[in-house]
Amino acid sequence: MFGAAKGQNGKNPEAEAAKIEAQKRSFTEGVANLEPFAQEGNFEKCETVIKKLMESLKKSKLPGDFMKQTQQQADHMLRDAYMMATDKAIHAALKAGRGDDREGLTKALKDASAAIAGAMKYKASPKFKEACTAALEIAKLSGGIKQEGPTKAKPLDTAPKPKNLAKPDEDYYRALAEAESEADAPRSEGDEPKGGGARKGKTSDALLDFTHD
């Protein structure tokens, strides 16, 4: 009988509000849906989709605070994607180093360096970079690549498991690198490995789940 109430611009305020909320939800879910790709370390996919989303967001005329919030959400997603890519590259480097695969090691080191740079771009912790660098030094040494200057790897009795397997822990790579160093250290016959369980010349049992494919 009566038409819907309209504002001064001739538009229905309630309908406009609902439209804005639908747009916000579309962008928020668009970024959130990239989580599986981020957990795979597929930062290329995440970068491509997020670039398109951000371009559309700028044209949407949505509130500035929402645009800032969405940008932060996207940056966190990209950070996680690069961290996972780093994780995969470091494991590949350690495996290649132990297997004397120089070509594979070179590629893995290059991939790891690029992934670390990406993670730092999106505000990963400096401790994450330090720990990754220590693990890569071990990979270089085990693969016969001469490392100039002192390394950060130090002997460690035991290696703790990471707190969260779904995402690389900041202290994980440091422990991994130190455990690899301790496990590969030469020992005279009859010496027992430190930590009471790691077999001579092999990765400690605490790391078996994280160093094999």
Image (tube, rainbow, N blue to C red):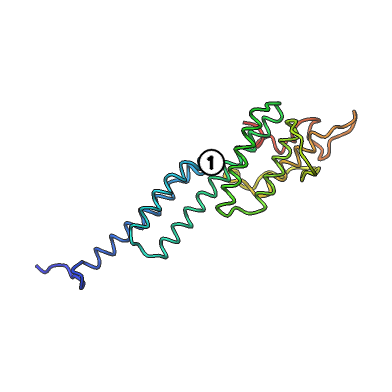
Q: Position of residue 189 (x, y in %)?
A: 90, 28
Q: Amino acid under label 1?
A: Gly
The quarter of the picture where the C terminus appears is top right
The quarter of the picture where the N terminus appears is bottom left
Q: Position of residue 111 (x, y in %)?
A: 59, 38
Residue visible at 37% across and 57% down in the picture: 58
Residue visible at 74% across and 33% down in the picture: 145
Along the line of sight, the residue nearer the viewer: 38 or 145: 145
Count of numbered tags: 1
In the rendered image of this protein, does residue 122 appear above or below residue 173? below
In the rendered image of this protein, does residue 30 appear above or below residue 213? below
Along the line of sight, the residue nearer the viewer: 208 or 78: 78
Along the horizontal axis of the image, is 186 left or right of 3?
right
Along the horizontal axis of the image, is 39 left or right of 143?
left
Along the horizontal axis of the image, is 123 left or right of 177?
left
Q: Position of residue 134 (x, y in %)?
A: 72, 44
Mark 1 neighbour class, 10 Å CA radius: few under 14, some 14 to 19, many 20 or more: many
Please name the residue that numbered disc 1 is placed on: 41
Question: Outermost residue toward the left?
Answer: 1
Along the line of sight, the residue nearer the viewer: 94 or 202: 94
Q: Position of residue 17 (x, y in %)?
A: 29, 64
Residue visible at 79% across and 30% down in the picture: 201
